[in-house]
Amino acid sequence: MDVLSDVIAVMRTGAPRSARVERHAPWGQRFRHAPGTAGFEVALAGSYWLLPREGDPIAVGAGDVLFFPHGGEYGLADAPLTPLGDIPFPGVDADGPDRPSATGPPSAVVLCGAYQLDADRGHPLLDDLPGIVHLPARVGRQTCLRAAVDLLGSELQDPGPGAGAVVPSLLDTLLVYILRTWLEEQPACGGTGGWATALADPAVSAALDAVHSDPARPWTVAELADRAGLSRAAFARRFNALVGRPPLTYLTWWRLTTAARLLRESDAPLGTVAEQVGYSSEYAFANAFKRAFAVAPGRYRRTR
């Protein structure tokens, strides 16, 4: 898989949740996400306001996408001064925007929900994202993101046969396009570091692709520098500046992160897992894993 696909596969846990909600003015909601939850909101119709815990209100219009990668607390309302009611989760409408007594057309129709992420082993790409990702609708831009939103909104409004299989797949697709859109827009904003720049940098991206495509290979800095088309010293400096850690440190981190996912999602013997992530013996793998996770791999599997 490519790097972004790998990142999503590692950080995702559990099943995403979503709902199509019609909101009738006046309405205001305060959302509180638990650690390991990333919320999202898509304005299908109408307009409303995002009320960050800190900072000025942000106008949200039809077609806008909001993503909250680190969870946290924020408010949504039909107007900046509307009082906020508390609800536990997007899509769980405890404060009554869909109350039976509501009459007339809704002031906003939204697609909302959340992804469950690994709170203990998040990828640094996710850490680079701001607390609020606001992707305004732009005519002729973000066509893939818009298509995913349209398909998901249609399926939730009028579920057809196979909706139970289609909706989770579309939610996964939506997450990919949200992250891809954000990453693609960063270099244009003059970013000088972080994962957006790393993935856009041909040299560092080539090295990351090599590591992710074959983490079990005993890579050296010289081999990765050759993939990057740079001298060993120049490659090491650039990789460390953009990724935030030296090449072989990232390789070890990625191997053990991949091992954790294999332990959670498969019944493969520990020796097989060790081999798949580049360790010559189960003993060496167990020691490295325990240093990183403070627990032996067998116990990690049982508790997860």
Image (cartoon, helix red, strand yellow):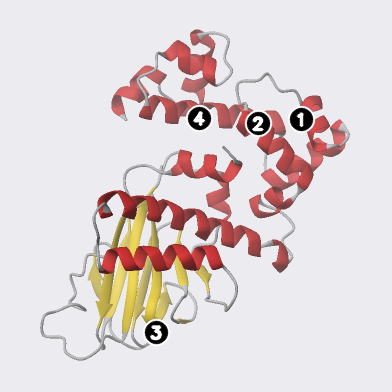
The alpha-carbon separation of the residues under discs 3 and 4 comes to 41 Å
Element under disc 1: helix
The percent coordinates of residue 263 (x first, y second) are: 40, 25
Q: Nearer the viewer, residue 139 or 229?
A: 139
Residue 296 appears anywhere in the view: no
The percent coordinates of residue 193 (x first, y second) are: 71, 54
Q: Is residue 103 above or below residue 109?
A: below
Residue beneath disc 1: 224
Residue beneath disc 3: 47
Q: Amino acid at mark 2?
A: Val
Q: Is residue 115 above or below residue 295?
A: below
The alpha-carbon separation of the residues under discs 2 and 4 comes to 12 Å
Circles 2 and 4 in contact, beta carbons < 8 Å: no
The alpha-carbon separation of the residues under discs 1 and 3 comes to 49 Å
Q: Amino acid at mark 4?
A: Thr
Circles 1 and 4 in contact, beta carbons < 8 Å: no
Residue beneath disc 2: 211
Q: Is residue 211 left or right of residue 23?
A: right
Answer with mark 2 or mark 3, whichever residue precedes in sequence: 3
Answer with mark 3 or mark 4, whichever residue precedes in sequence: 3
Element under disc 2: helix
